[in-house]
Amino acid sequence: MATFGMVLQLARKVRGMEQKTLADKTGVSRSYLSRVELGLKPPLAGEAMQRVVEVLQLSEEEKHRLEAARALSAVRFQLPKGLTPMQVELANRFHQVLARLTPQQVSVLNTQLLNEQESRGSKPQIR
């Protein structure tokens, strides 16, 4: 699934709108909006999100897609209790290298995790 920034950027570009124009019409700085689209800042929320939906005149489907991407893009977990020392070490190593992973590496890891969840009959949970 696409990130919040990717979905937002696509919706903006499909409408032929420049970042600066969207920023001006929503009251979000162009610099911040750029960082959101690049995934360097967290997804928009609250009033800023509502203004983007209104300015871009998103359909219900587009709004749903943006909300779903926002939910998946937000950091929303802590390590579970009861992990073994090896599991904690793995989580710490993963945290250290996560920002340096290539898109291809991220895709491979994501595919592996989704396959594991499907084989166990569980689905990703969004909180």
Image (cartoon, rainbow, N blue to C red):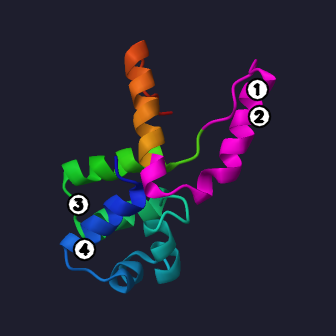
The reply to whether dot 4 and dot 2 touch (C-beta < 8 Å) is: no
Type of amino acid at the residue the image marks with label 2: Glu
The reply to whether dot 1 and dot 2 touch (C-beta < 8 Å) is: yes
Could you tell me how far apart the alpha carbons at marks 4 and 1 are, in whole angstroms?
A: 45 Å
- Decide if residue 123 is on the left or right side of residue 56: right
Instruction: Choose mark 4 or mark 2, whichever is in front.
Output: 2
The reply to whether dot 1 and dot 3 touch (C-beta < 8 Å) is: no
Circle 1 sits in a helix, a strand or a loop, which is it? helix
Q: Is residue 17 magenta?
A: no
Q: Position of residue 95 (x, y in %)?
A: 68, 46
Could you tell me how far apart the alpha carbons at marks 4 and 2 are, in whole angstroms?
A: 42 Å
Q: Is residue 54 above or below residue 121?
A: below
Residue range in magenta is 77-106
Q: Is residue 57 above or below residue 15?
A: above
Type of amino acid at the residue the image marks with label 3: Leu
Q: Is residue 117 above or below residue 31?
A: above
Could you tell me how far apart the alpha carbons at marks 1 and 2 are, in whole angstroms?
A: 5 Å
> What number is the disc on residue 89?
2
Residue tagged by mark 3? 58
Q: Sequence order check: which comes first, mark 4 or mark 2? A: 4
Q: Sequence order check: which comes first, mark 2 or mark 3? A: 3
Residue tagged by mark 4? 13
Toward which corner of the image does residue 41 lie, by quadrant? bottom right
Q: Residue at x 51, y 33 (%)?
A: 127
Toward which corner of the image does residue 17 lie, by quadrant? bottom left
Q: Residue at x 38, y 85 (%)?
A: 20
Instruction: Choose mark 1 or mark 3, whichever is in front.
Output: 1
